[in-house]
Amino acid sequence: MKRWLAHDPRYSWLGAPIDVRPLFAVEQAALMATLRDLEQADWGKEAVPGWSVRALATHILGDFYGRLARDRDGHQEGPRFAPGETLETFIHRINQEWIDALARVSPAALTDTLDLVGGQVTRFFETTDPGAPSLGVSWAGIDPAPMWLDCARDLTEFWTHRQQIRHAVGQGTDLNPHLLSVVLDIFMRALPHTLRHTAAAVGTQIQVSVDGPAGGTWAVTATGDRWSLSEPHAGQTAARVGMDADSAWRLCTRGITPATALARAHVTGARQLAEATCQIVSIIY
């Protein structure tokens, strides 16, 4: 069940704030169940291009340590940007450096450490102030972001990595709506930023609908200076994009291309607006 926070007019274009803090324990338990069920050979299977299951699990541990060091412990040491390095390049570089450094750690030791440190991360998030300023969320176009969105971004990253591990070992997406409905809702916060260069008359509305128990309908409306998430209004929609839940999350994380998503989707109205909407990316990519 979604837990909504008090409305903050500073970020109204991002939609209603959502409290994901209680869900970190749920996601952490699901991750540990997935990892502890792996066979030895599973750890070497490719989870994402260039990374094995073991490498991806190591990356998650790095995210855990980074969050605790930065936000819980106030630890300022660590990697720095190289001259001229973009955010994406910096993140990809330090992620690979971390994975290379932990190559000597066995899968069993890695799993136990993820269990220990992941529990600490869960407890940290439970104590955060959702309205406090925090790290920017580049795919939503906001820096600094409110903590509720920063927390939400981390939840979606952990959930996505778990699906990538599941797929690597022959399992399907975990379509449990308890988490997936929230993940999809968070991913859709990227819509205003996605459409920032798309011109439309004030009041133009686009709707994205996702089928199934984890789905819903999200609307984004042109307001003049930006697009803003809003309540869907029948009869005022210039374009509608409908898709299944598995296609929706894969599109947002570039597990499928926009062209593939459009081929699977049911589109009505202005095709150009639908195509622009399907450029959504809800991860650092």
Image (spheres, helix red, strand yellow):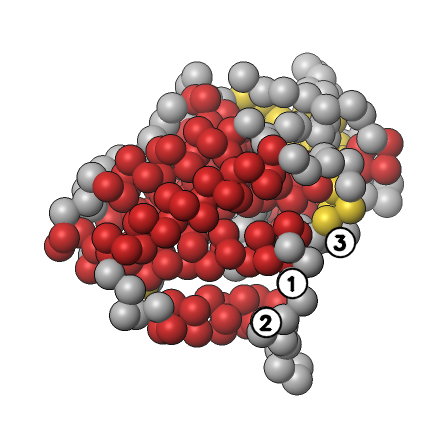
User: N-terminal of the two: label 1 or label 3?
Assistant: 1
Q: Is 98 situated above or below 190?
A: below
Residue 75: numbered disc: 1
Residue 78: numbered disc: 2
Tell me how far mark 1 sits from mark 3, CA to CA. Answer: 20 Å
Q: Nearer the viewer, mark 3 or mark 2?
A: 2
Tell me how far mark 3 sits from mark 2, CA to CA. Answer: 21 Å
Between 210 and 123, the one nearer to me in the picture: 123
Identified by mark 2, the residue type is Gly
User: N-terminal of the two: label 3 or label 2?
Assistant: 2
Tell me the residue at 63%/20% (across/down).
Answer: 3
**Pointer 1 and pointer 2: residues touching (CB < 8 Å)?**
yes
Q: Is 93 situated above or below 134?
A: below
Quadrant in which the N terminus appears: top right
Q: Nearer the viewer, mark 1 or mark 3?
A: 1
Between 18 and 74, the one nearer to me in the picture: 74
Residue at image mark 3 = 143
State the image quarter where residue 218 is shown: top right
Q: Is 103 situated above or below 20?
A: below
Tell me how far mark 1 sits from mark 2, CA to CA. Answer: 8 Å
- Expressed as whole percent of the image width and height from the top left, the position of residue 35 reads 27, 44
- Expressed as whole percent of the image width and height from the top left, the position of residue 122 reads 52, 38
Instruction: Look at the image and tell me whether residue 191 can be seen.
Output: no
Horizontal side, residue 237 vs residue 97: left or right: right
